[in-house]
Amino acid sequence: MDGRFLLSFSLFMVAILLGFSDLAVAQQDTAYTNGRYLYRPYSSADSIIDSDSLLLRAKIDSLEMVRMQFIRDSIEAREIFIRDSIARREHILDSLKILKDQLPQLLEAALKTFTDNFIVSSGKIHIIGDSMLSNYVSKVLPLTTDQPFTPWQHTVNLSDKPAKLTLNAKTNKIATIQSPGMACSFEHNPRGNMVKITGKGIIASNASVKVYKTPIDSVFFDTKGRVIKVKRSVLFSTVVNSIQQGAPLFTHLSQVKQYEYSADNELAKFEIVNFCDRKSSGDPKKVCFMVTYSLIRQGNIYIMTRRNDPANEFSDGTFTYEFDNQSTLKSIAFLNFQKTEDRKTFIELNEDGNVGSYVYQNKGIVKNTLLFNYSLNDPKAKYKIENISCTFDEDGVSYYQVNNTTGKSRVRDRLTMEWSPWR
């Protein structure tokens, strides 16, 4: 019995020990399950945040806000720049369109006012890209044959050396043009069929008295916008402080030009009436002389008849202008009505397309020529253009030349055919 008791007690103690062991294991498993011994990433909640960490985070957040604001400001500035650029380009383009539409008529009117050249066609102006105008080129029938470059064309540079133009803010019409060859202001009447052109005034002597002369011209247009009349006047004024315009004295009508056109819209008749000069408002107004031109075109050939009043037997006659297919003038022939003057001038171009020489033929015989030397791109050249007259003998050879620019001349030896130095 004592043995059974001991055995039972031993088994009881083993069970108690096993129970404690299971309890410990269960508690240990619960600890792992609750994550006491599991690895977890660092979390700010697991540590105490000191003031330095808060300051660092505040600085980082502040820099991020500044960076984002900088990005937003940059995007907004770029958008404003693009909008302003587009607006500027549109404004420039709108201005160019106004100039393109108005300039051809005004420039033709100005050229017909300031010169007596026979302008047979007015060129068009185009917009190059969106910020530049093409040059204005008009076709001219020159009355003289001694000019360099291309005298059968009149070019107003509107591209690389453009004229300065201003617009009237109320009417959107061109108000002024300033260029080396033209300086004037424009006043348009409401109907659009007349424009007054005021040129640059000068100081001159009138009967030993200094006066201020201001050209004031009126140009009239027909319903098709063509020039039909030009009235040229000069306003005489006193001179103040030796250089300034003073009180007006009188207005002198100096010239009237009238134009007629064919059914093909080409210039057919051109009349110039010149009035005699006047020294005061009391002087009579009278016509000094008149010139009438009539024109016929046959393909590339223009036949122009000139009549002076009073008549001039040497200059009254017919001019024949021959152009090539590129509108380059090849020759000009003149025959007076009495057929005593029979001249023809041939035009030879240099490699730049400018006049290289005029070859003058009189009654079928070449007696002289006029040569041109251009030094436009030579900064050391004393003369940019020189013209040289060559005289030919009956054998067709030139033995004598005169440089009309320098005043020097030279001769050719008839035996050796060598030229002497310029003297």
Image: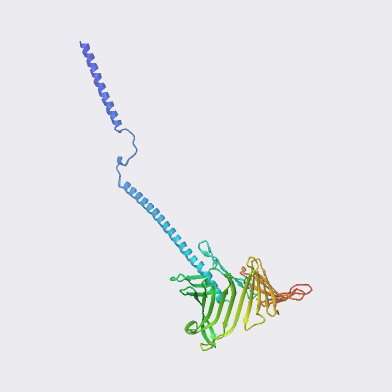
Identify the image quadrant of residue 43.
Answer: top left
Quadrant for the N terminus, please. top left
Tell whether 87 sits left or right of 267. left
Q: Nearer the viewer, residue 36 or 352?
A: 352
Residue 370 placed where, x, y %? 68, 74
Residue 254 placed where, x, y %? 55, 82
Identify the image quadrant of residue 317.
Answer: bottom right
Tell whether 330 sits left or right of 172. right
Q: How many marks?
A: 0
- The residue furthest left is 1
Identify the image quadrant of residue 27.
Answer: top left
Residue found at x 25% / y 24%: 20
Tell whether 345 sits left or right of 160. right
Residue 164 placed where, x, y %? 51, 70
Residue 381 can be seen in this image: no
- The residue furthest front is 263
Residue 372 can be seen in this image: yes
Quadrant for the C terminus, please. bottom right
- The residue furthest right is 415
Residue found at x 23% / y 18%: 12
Question: What is the basis of the colouring in this image?
Answer: rainbow
Residue found at x 27% / y 24%: 22
Residue 414 placed where, x, y %? 78, 74
